[in-house]
Amino acid sequence: MSVPQARAEHVGSFKRPAALLQKRTDFENRSCSADELHALEDEAIADIVRLQIGLNLDNITDGEFRRSMFYDGMFDCLGGMKVVNDPPEYLFQGKLERTKSLYGEAFDFLKEVAGPENVAKLKVTMGSPEWYHFRHGKYTYESTAYSNDDDYFADLIKIYRDEFRDLYARGCRHIQIDDPILASFCDTRFRKLMIDAGVDPEGLLDTYIRVLDGCIGGKPSDLIASLHICRGNVRPDRQPFTRGPYDWIAKKIFSNLNFERYYLEYDTDDAGTLEPLRYLPRNKHVVLGLVSTKTPELEDPEVLRERILQAAEVISRGEIPRSFEEALDQLSISPQCGFASHAPGFAIVTYEDMLKKLTLVRDVARSVWTQR
C-alpha cells in the first residue's frame, strides 16, 4: 500500500460535538458508563471521518475524539507512572512499561469506518517522548526507577518503537508525533530559563533530537513519520506558549532527524520568516501551518498562495539548490494546529468556522498544485 502525496492536510484534532463533551463530563462525574461514552465516541468519529472524506482532505484521523488532551493515550497508559500535580513529587515511580497496545484499537475502528479505499490516508497522532522530562526536569523519575536520563529514554524509545510496529501491523502508514517542546528552543525566554537552571539549551536539544530519532528508528520505509512542532494551542487567551523563529533549530531538525514530514506553525509573525526552510533536504517535506485554528476570521486565499510560493522560492535557493518546481513539490498546506488540542477547543471558533477553514485549505491546495 503506497501513501498518496498529500497537499491539503490537517494536524489531527477537531471540534467535538456538544453531546460528546457532555457525555465525557457525565462519565467523569460517574453518571454514565464507559460503554455509553465509548458508543457515543464511535458515533462522533464515524461522522468526523465522513466529513474528512467528503472534503477530500489528504489526511484522515479520528479527530482525537477519545482524548481530553492531545497527548492522552501514551504516558497515562504506561505502567510505572504516578499521577501528580506538580514537583517535588516524582512523576514516575517505577520503570515505564507498555503492557498493551496504546492506539491500536482506536486505529482499528478508524480503519473500519474509513473503508479500505481510504486506509492509505489514515493518520495516528501521539504525544512526544520528551514531554514530561522537559516539564519536570530532575523530578521526572525516582532514582529507584532510573539512575540516569539515558536509561529513562531508552525505555521510552523501546515503547514508541513497539507501538509503531503494532500500528504498522494493523495497517497504519502515517504516524505523527505532536511536539510542543522543540519550539521552546526557539524562544529566548525559555532558553534563558534553561541557562538559569544550569541546563545547556543546545545540549538538551541534541538529547531530545537523539530520543525522537530513536523512537522512529527501524520503522518500515513505507511508514511515514511526521513531526508537528507545536507552539501551544490551549491557553484561554489563545496566545502561544512559545515564540521565536525556527532559525534556532531548523538545521538540526532537518539534518539530524529522520522524519519525512514536518508540520510547522506559520500562522503568525511569532514564527519568524520562512528563511529557515533553506535547510530542508531534498528527501523531506514541510507542511505549512498557515491557517489559524485560534480565530474564526478566514484567511485570504491569495495571501496563502503567495506564502506557499515564497516558501518554495526559499527552498529552491537553499543550502542545496533545486528547481522551484521541485521545491514546491516538497510543500503542503494545513491549519497551524488541531482545532481542539484540549477537548473543548476554543469557544470563539465554531464547528462551522472549522469547516470553512478546512475547505479553504483544500481549495488553496488545489489552486497551487493542480493548476501548474
Image (spheres, helix red, strand yellow):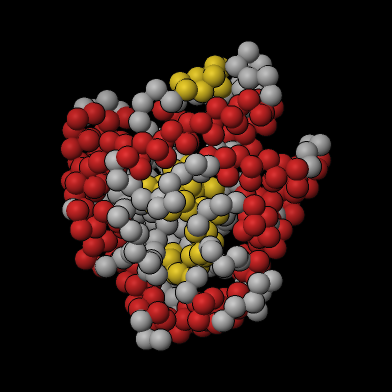
**The N terminus sits in image quarter:** bottom left
**The C terminus sits in image quarter:** bottom left
**Residue sitting at 44 percent across and 29 percent down?**
76
Name above or below for residue 359 compared with residue 301: above
**Residue 347 horizontal/vertical position (percent):** 38, 56
Name above or below for residue 99 compared with residue 262: above
Classify residue 272 by image quadrant.
bottom right
Name above or below for residue 36 compared with residue 203: above
Q: Nearer the viewer, residue 143 or 98?
A: 98
**Residue sitting at 51 percent across and 23 percent down?**
96
User: Is residue 313 visible to us here?
Assistant: yes
**Residue sitting at 61 percent across and 26 percent down?**
152
User: Is residue 350 visible to us here?
Assistant: no
**Residue sitting at 18 percent across and 37 percent down?**
39
**Residue 264 horizontal/vertical position (percent):** 54, 61
**Residue 292 horizontal/vertical position (percent):** 46, 65
Question: Residue at the top extreme?
Answer: 144
Classify residue 89 by image quadrant.
top right
Q: Nearer the viewer, residue 169 or 80?
A: 169
71 left or right of 188 in image: left
